[in-house]
Amino acid sequence: MGKLLLMHPEKCVGCRTCEIVCSLTHADICNPASARISVVKYEQLGINLPLTCANCEDPVCTAVCPTGALSRQGDRVEIDYDSCVGCRMCVMACPVGGVSFDPVTRHVIKCDQCGGDPQCVKFCPQGAIEYVDDDALAPRARRNAAERLLALIGPGGER
């Protein structure tokens, strides 16, 4: 059983506190470009979505890395900085945008969940980021899907 970051875009107000806290925690600077989380704003939909590495079951980033610097270790994808040459193939291949390139350190970076104590969760003023057991996710997803369906069809089963 592992843990993962669960994002709640309906709660995110786009303050980007998570990006600032992350960059301060990992790079000792207040620079969103050095954060391992990024908030993507969808203007037309009126939502903000915090994004991090999804630690995919079969990660594309590890498959495209020419030096093997990215590898799946248990339930997470890790970066071996001694092997990384900074080619950014992983950045281009990541389907969720969870790997990025820090322009300050000139390293590829991704969320490491702050070693099990994610600071973005602690400092998010809206509670838009949660750190949950991955086995608790399926029941929650089913419940949320049922609630969305009920909202669409109404209490009497009519639209």
Image (tube, rainbow, N blue to C red):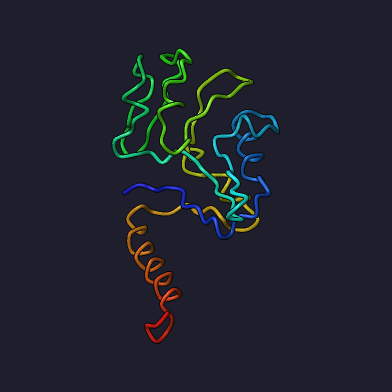
Question: In the image, 110: left or right of 3?
Answer: right
Q: Residue at x 59, y 43 (%)?
A: 39
The residue at the far right in this view is 30
Which of the two residues, 18 or 158, is positioned nearer the viewer here?
158
Looking at the image, the residue that sits furthest to the front is: 159
Quarter of the image for residue 126 reads bottom right
Spot occupied by residue 104 in the image (x, y as percentages of width and height):
64, 21
Instruction: Give the residue at x 38% y 32%.
Output: 77
Compared to residue 120, the image places residue 85 above or below, namely above
Q: Residue at x 40, y 28 (%)?
A: 93
Quadrant of the rendering where the C terminus is positioned: bottom left
Asked if 124 appears above or below 33 in the picture, the reply is below
Image x and y of residue 56, in percent: 35, 39
Residue positioned 46% across, 15% down in the render: 87
Residue lying farthest to the bottom in this orientation: 156
Residue nearest the viewer, comparing 129 with 101: 101
Left-right relation of 125 to 140: right
Residue 8 on image: x %, y %: 52, 56
Count of labels shown? 0
